Amino acid sequence: MTELQIAGIFIAILLAMILMRIPIGISLIAVSFGGLWSMFNWNIAWGSLGIVPYSFANSWVLSSIPAFLFMGFICYHTRLTQGLFNAAQIWLSSLPGGLAIASVFGCAGFAAVTGSSVACSAAMGKIAVPEMVRHRYSPELATGTVAAAGTIGALIPPSILMILYGIISRQSVSALFLGGLVVGVITLVAYIVLILVRVKMNPDLAPPVQISATRAEKIKALGQTWPVLLIVIGVFAGLFGGAFTPTEAGAIGAMLSTIVALLYRTLTFKALRMAITETLTTTAALLIIAVGASLLTRFLALSGIGDALSDAILGFGAAPLLIMIGIVCVYLALGMMLEPVGAMLLTLPIVLPIVEETGYSLLWFGVVLVKLLEIGMITPPMGMNVFVIKGVVGNTASLSTIFKGVFWFVIVDLLIVAALIAVPDIVMFLPDWVGR
């Protein structure tokens, strides 16, 4: 049996394990180890299991992941971000769909300190959805807005997906953050326009809300946003200004969030313990998947199947645009079944060489990839953000209602992806401008 045949068999086994809901990190490690053992021998397989995880974890940039996670969990458990929605609610409530628009702004602000779509959806779902329902907003609009806006969490820095992508593809994490910031802002504006148009066409979705507030009360509400603003400005002004690296930015962010929570008097022992516990468990889960993906990369490289698949796809002679459209369709399909980290790390060993051969920038592709993976967070049957919102709102809305609510946002997201492919400079202009 040839090495390509062995690789084909073990990839089929990997897909079967994933369909059986075996954790993707365990599946990747088991299949890679078994494939190397079958192709070579026990010593090589065992040696790879000892060397590859150490080589991957030895990346200094990787240490920014637990730091940024801790920053986000501290902000979440100490309620530092709650003032964002309160301020947006007071200032924007008079607009058509103003509370939904305030939810989008709240998610964007929360994204700037978490980098997690799930955490963003969970936090804003608890704060914003009950408020919208209380003002007789359609449950479809209320839940769909927060579920979709939560996806901004992986686009606006810090983004855990972009850090992992940068390490694997050897692209600048800071440049990826800048490209993601542009796409995140575009997504935010597009969502707001969508809400305005839908409510104008159907006012019953969001009855007018008048929250009376004096100028002094409005200024006071803005003052409640200082915890997040201080953290965001402190971290990202230094990061994008070149004062420190992404790794140092994570450490500074973790320190700043802890200090601000102490000053805000919301850092209890329980909140600190929960933040530390969730940081450790999330980091461990991410690292297991990432180590499995690194082993899979070694296995595919030694078997030659990655090069064979790349050559086969490129051998069709299709235009680069058609190949990219095909890659987009694959990721949209994967997003319906797998969580983002698993989908990304499972496919990058095969997809990156194809993207590079077609002449596309790996930096540009990283931002587009994160956008595609986030669309998967709100598409059936998995739609992780949808299930998170359902868990938060309980009987307020059914799963079908939430999926209907996100439908129009998915259409907008697909239009954004089409624009990014048609005009790559949308992603590249800010990283290129800062890098000059």
Image: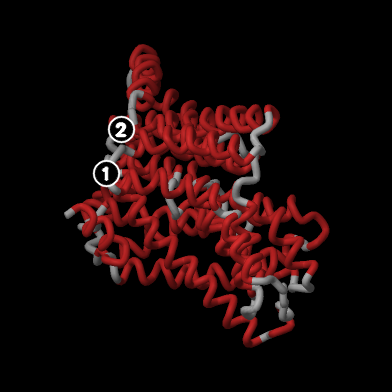
Query: Secondary structure under badge 1?
Result: loop
Image coords of residue 185 (percent x, y): 43, 64
- Residue at image coords 60%, 50%: 81
Image coords of residue 273 (percent x, y): 65, 27
Quadrant where the image shows the N terminus: top left
Residue 244, by quadrant, is top left
What kind of residue is marked 1?
Gly
Image coords of residue 51 (percent x, y): 34, 18
Query: Secondary structure under badge 2?
Result: helix
- Residue at image coords 22%, 59%: 433
Residue 330, relative to residue 353: is it above or below? below
In the rendered image, the residue lying farthest to the left is 436
Separation of disc 2 and disc 1 at Cα? 41 Å
Residue 132, relative to residue 266: is it above or below? below
What kind of residue is marked 2?
Ser
Residue 372 in the figure: left or right of residue 271:
left
Q: Residues within 10 Å of mark 1 (few under 14, many from 20)?
A: few
- Residue at image coords 33%, 20%: 40
Q: Is residue 382 visible?
A: no
Is label 2 in contact with label 1 (beta carbons under 8 Å)?
no
Q: Nearer the viewer, residue 226 or 286?
A: 226
Residue 282, relative to residue 96: is it above or below? above
Give the residue pinned by disc 1. 242
Instruction: Specify the label residue 303 is tagged with.
Output: 2
Residue 199, by quadrant, is bottom right
